[in-house]
Image (cartoon, rainbow, N blue to C red):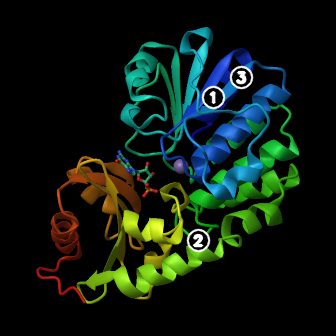
Amino acid sequence: MTKNISDELGGFIRGNDNFLLLTHEKPDGDAIGSIFGLFKILRDNGKKADAFLPEKLPARYASFVPEDVIIGKMPELEKYSWIICLDTSTPDRIGVDKDQRAKILSLQLVNVDHHPDNKLFGKKNFISPESAATAEIIFKALKDSGSLRISQEAATCLLIGIIMDTGGFRFDNTKALTLKAASELLVAGADYPRVINAMFFSQPLNFVKMEAELVSKHMKTAFSGKYAWAYLSDELLTEHGIEKKDTETLIDLLRQIQGVEIAAVFYRKDDGFKISLRSKNKKYPVAKIARTLGGGGHELAAGAFIKAAEISEAEKILQDRVGEMLGEKDGNPL
Ligand code: 5GP
Ligand code: MN
């Protein structure tokens, strides 16, 4: 992150008050860690602040929710001086009621994010694509600003953001500065073992069984095993008693396989399918594929929506594009 952005964000937070914090729909670890961490820092330092999430959180984050976070019922937007939107690249992904999104854009909106394709929709935009996580941006800016106290609880939340967006420091967005921020968060009292246990070593047994079934019965591969994908159907989720919101890390099951360069997971949504895309190789920037489908994201972690009646139709659309990217013509699904 440039010193400028960091200084300006730190100065903005110190010099203002009365904030509402928001993040993106279907919030992931960085969204949740960022909103909780910033909320705690603001409140701990005597600022007026609320944090709003539209729906129940994925189970792994349940024990980290700070007191007073608003879940479900949207607060009245006009009563805040500033609305800070975290980790959200486009206004249509802001996690609020759909009819409130246009209104938010007309208010004093501040955008803090690390997506390279951020649409700069705020009145102020603090965007740092070289940061691994939005939580990393927040921590650096507020720590450097000097005068704000960062509690152990806030540090733990920000650490969640960094850990989840780097896949536990495994993805190539893990830079020296990312590890430095994580190290400084530990110095500030972040509870590393607690975070690791909750994020990675607490999968309910029914979830692990569902994963086993997904890989053994529903995963397909093509292009000599360089592309692996699976359709996570509502039936499979229901059969195992799992909610869609708890499937954030599922795609890593496919990404981890030797030889797989690109992985995809499909979910049903409205009149089509939502896709999650991951790549292990800069040669295959899946964000490009996502963009051709109207979506976006990071080079190696992206997503989009494909309108289609049947899953086979959506699978074919994506497989053609993956094939083009891999330089292969015909896939041979196994
Ligand atoms: P995930 O697969 O975890 O849902 O998303 C991976 C990345 O792609 C995230 O950084 C997210 O912001 C981005 N992404 C996912 N879906 C969409 C989408 O529909 N539109 C855009 N612009 N980005 C998306
Ligand atoms: Mn993020």
Q: How many marks?
A: 3
Q: Secondary structure at mark 2?
A: loop
Mark 3: which secondary structure? strand
Residue pictured at 22% horizontal, 65% vertical:
311
Q: Position of residue 214 (x, y in %)?
A: 42, 79
Q: Amino acid at mark 1?
A: Leu
Left or right: 164, with 24 as reference point: right
Q: Observer-nearest residue: 260 or 235?
A: 235
* Image x and y of residue 24, in percent: 49, 40
Question: Where residue 153 sits: x, y (%)?
Answer: 83, 45
Q: Nearer the viewer, residue 63 or 73?
A: 73
Q: Residue furthest left?
A: 329
Instruction: Provide the residue designation for mark 2.
Output: 170
User: Alpha-carbon distance for marks 3 and 2?
Assistant: 34 Å
Secondary structure under tag 1 reads helix
Say if 185 sits above or below 118 in the image.
Answer: below
- Label 3 sits on what residue type? Ala
Q: Horizontal and vertical percent for residue 200?
A: 67, 70
Q: Nearer the viewer, mark 3 or mark 2?
A: 3
Q: Which mark is residue 9?
A: 1
Q: Earlier in the sequence, mark 2 or mark 1?
A: 1
Q: Which residue is mark 3?
A: 49
Residue in the picture at 55% in, 59% down: 246
CA distance separating discs 1 and 3: 16 Å
Q: Earlier in the sequence, mark 3 or mark 2?
A: 3
Asked if 171 appears above or below 63 in the picture, the reply is: below
Q: Tell me the quadrant of the picture where the C terminus can be found.
A: bottom left
Instruction: Answer whether residue 299 is visible to the viewer in this image.
Output: no
